[in-house]
Amino acid sequence: MPAELEAQLNHTDRAVRLHALRELKRLAEAGRVKIEPTRPWVNMHCHTTYSYNAHGFSPARAAWEMYRRGLTAAGTVDFDSLDAVEEVLCASDALHFRLTAGIETRVCVPEMPREVFSSPNEPGIAYYMGQGFVSVPPQGSAAAGTLARMAESARRRNLGVLERVNAHLQEVTIDYARDVLPLTPAGNATERHMLQAYDDAAQRVFSDPARRAQFWAGKLGLAAGDVQRLMSDAVAFRNTLRARLMKYGGPGYVTPEPSSFPALQETAAMILACGAIPMYAWLDGTNSGESDAELLLDFFAGTPGFGLNIVPDRNWNLRDPSERALKVRKLNEIVSKARERHIPLSAGTEINNAAQPMVDHFDSPELRPHAEAFLDGGLILWGHSLLLRHGGFGYNSPQAHSAFGGDVAARNAFFREAGARPVPHGSALHNLRAASKAGDPKAVLRALET
């Protein structure tokens, strides 16, 4: 029965997914489903099927996977979409689990058009996030317009890539509406959906693996034997397709123009208008725009109440010793500088690539020194999300500015403490809402004690 319920977590009907989640929670409380002991680890960066998840996890399934692993907190993040928000909040309620919802996109940084930030080989372009959403922007609002432009820009970029790759492959072509969009629950396709569609199309056209390997070898510039070995590992093969066909230097690559992406300030304004926390998505500290951690943080601190997202696994889990040493040093530096400035940190593994771990190895020598900072960040994000949803007392809310003014350390300490308290539900939320609306930190913490 638990296996059947877990399978239903990826059902196409959200009501079925949430019903299965509630049933799994009931079985867990009855001791019929094993849940790992709670540990002070987080994954605040889980992509779902509303953008792309390598395991096909819906928001409900992602919530369950993090919950059953005993994480203290988790968060979903989807590219150019807030479609998962409502399901994430319902999953949090169903499991009584600290779970937040977010968005990721790419933005243009017109102030520094020559610097390469977290989008490799793309000067003036950076990955950027918003975390702790509890609603989507109202229809007709400026924020809703920005979100719609983000989705439309992503669609146009995808179509440009598809047109170029189709022309390069010739024998194996796909149609966006017919082959790509059905792979998504809400029409929000990514490059990884297109890779899946190309892989599937090639298997239809060349049913014989040897002929298929020969085809790909000619299109990718690799030996047929190497391609055949790659094809035995779908993850490695599709990563190779992406690198050779769609990324910088590939036939499908489209050199980005500033108009291809929303501006940093426009995106930050949308995130703030929704009450969420803007976040710079840091890569690894080696590109020109990230090489000076202090300058980077000073610039992005121009957005009120911003945080920093890090995917730690790509900074230490590397084969090359020299690359590993450099990136571990950069990781240590950015975490240290962010903590000096009291910038909340969000850490996670993405899981939009099957080679990534479900949860970071926080017990590794490289991550152990930062585990507390990442836990603090996860609890701040959850505390913010909880209070924003129940009373409007979010991290960047008028209540927070009234209560803490410019004392960021005090603000962080409060939201961390609120986030660390047991997850409230049922009648316990009544007093919390009243205290949150009033913007009374002491009353909020008292309400959370019960």
Image: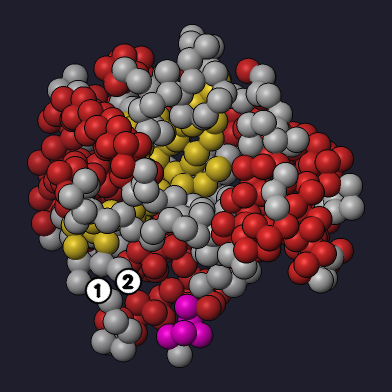
- Indicate the quadrant where residue 282 lies: top left
Whether residue 195 is visible, yes or no, is: yes
Residue placed under numbered mark 2 in the picture? 68
Task: Give left or right: position of 349 versus 149.
Answer: left
Residue placed under numbered mark 1 in the picture? 36
In the image shown, does 350 or 273 lie closer to the viewer? 350
Residue at image coords 19%, 19%:
406
Percent x, y for residue 295?
31, 14
Residue at image coords 32%, 36%:
322
Magenta segment includes 446: no
**Viewport quadrant of the C terminus:** bottom left
Task: Give left or right: position of 419 versus 255.
Answer: left
Count of numbered circles in the view = 2
**Which residue range is magenta in the image?**
2-6
In the image shown, does 230 or 374 lie closer to the viewer? 230
Task: Give left or right: position of 181 versus 405.
Answer: right
Q: What is the crowding at mark 1: few (fewer than 14 residues within 10 Å), some, or many (at least 20)?
A: few
The residue tagged with tag 1: helix, strand or loop?
A: loop
- Indicate the quadrant where residue 396 lies: top left
